[in-house]
Amino acid sequence: MGMPMTLLHTRPKGHAVQTPLLGFLAGPHADAIAEAWPAPHSGFLTLPTARRHAAAILLGNAAGLRGTEIVRVVERGRDRDLARLLVQGEAPGGLMKALGRLGEVLWEAGDYARFLGLFAEADAGRVLRHMTVIAADRLVLIGALPEALRRAGIIAHLPTRAAAVEDLAVAFRLALRIHGASEASAIAQRWNRASNALALFDMAAEALQPVRFGQVLPVPRLPEGFTPVSDRKALVGVALEFRNCLRDFTGDLAAGRMAVFTVREGSEMAAVALRQDPAGWRLAEAKGRQNEDVSEDALRRIVSVLERAGVRTGESTWVLARRLHEHACDDCGPAHMGSRETWRDRLALGSLWD
């Protein structure tokens, strides 16, 4: 006798036998599916695409169902009943049809959770219903946007670079600091009318411009332990003690666009610089003596105090507005991106000049 046409792939002890085809299509769900639909898994492989995805979701989050019950409802249940099980409640219309556009290879559990969450939203759900192909990496980009921006006109013009979408989301949050939270819907509606990606990102950059000129905000009131540097003599003393370049910013300090504090965090001393832009005060730098980095524990405590006082972290609106244009402009881009790998990176410290 010759070799069988279907080669079985034996899993380690304690795992069900699965075929290479199932391993390819089911990925991280292969073991659970092999338990529910034993090799050669024909009952599963002959299911419509939507029901195969439904099986993966239910097996990953059984919602109180045994494996045999999941097999029964996936193979023979009505679409409406299966959809209710997937969301554990009343399901939005068109859910099973949308599952059929997720492709043949099963997704990771986190991607399914993102899909179901977006599908339940009114605006994002309408967008997903009209997508001819729904890809997990595209949903990552959509999910990175604030819910107010998950609209067809905005999603249609999103670039494929995650950093560009992240900048768009940050721009929206800063725009609300500038114009007020009550303007969220109006700003989103305006951006939703963009004719292309460049128009969308230029609208976002425009939303970061100041409403009124010449406005100087009062310096944040910080708790005891944050000592303000309020005159030239104190500034010279701090610059000498810390051996830094703070004296170069005398003009900005005098104009009220910058504020400097010294703070003791345990055994550490830090010079903390704040700058003002249209979105308010932000942390621009925090350094120890001789421009040494402040330890992460001390820096986290400093940031926590500043955030409670209304001070934000991250880049200035001026820097972000320029980069938004570069993200979408073929003549200017690609936008230069600093590292965003760590929490400290995302603070964008060192950006003393706008």
Image: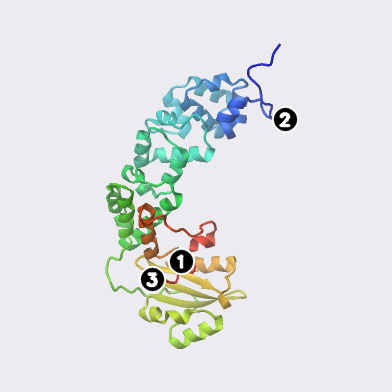
Image location (x, y in percent) of residue 281 = 40, 69
Decide which of tag 2 and tag 1 comes sooner along the chain. Answer: 2
Q: Quadrant of residue 94?
A: top left
Q: Going 64% across and 25% down the picture, which residue do you hit?
A: 18
Image location (x, y in percent) of residue 313 = 45, 64
Q: Residues within 10 Å of mark 3 (few under 14, many from 20)?
A: many
Q: Nearer the viewer, mark 1 or mark 3?
A: 3
Which amino acid, mark 2?
Answer: Lys
Mark pair 2, 3: CA separation: 62 Å
Image location (x, y in percent) of residue 245 = 49, 79
Is 183 in front, or is 149?
Answer: 149
State which quarter of the image contains the N terminus.
top right
Is 1 in front, or is 64?
Answer: 1
**Which residue is under mark 2?**
13
Helix or strand or loop: what does disc 2 sit on? loop
Do the residues under discs 1 and 3 have CB atoms within 8 angstroms? no
Mark pair 1, 3: CA separation: 17 Å
Q: Going 43% across and 74% down the picture, which residue do you hit?
A: 221
Q: Residues within 10 Å of mark 1 (few under 14, many from 20)?
A: few
Which amino acid, mark 1?
Answer: Arg
**Which residue is under mark 1?**
308
Compared to 343, does 33 lie above or below? above
Compared to 6, does 259 lie above or below? below
**Which residue is under mark 3?**
276
Residue 218 in view of the camera: yes
* Horizontal side, residue 49 vs residue 125: left or right: right
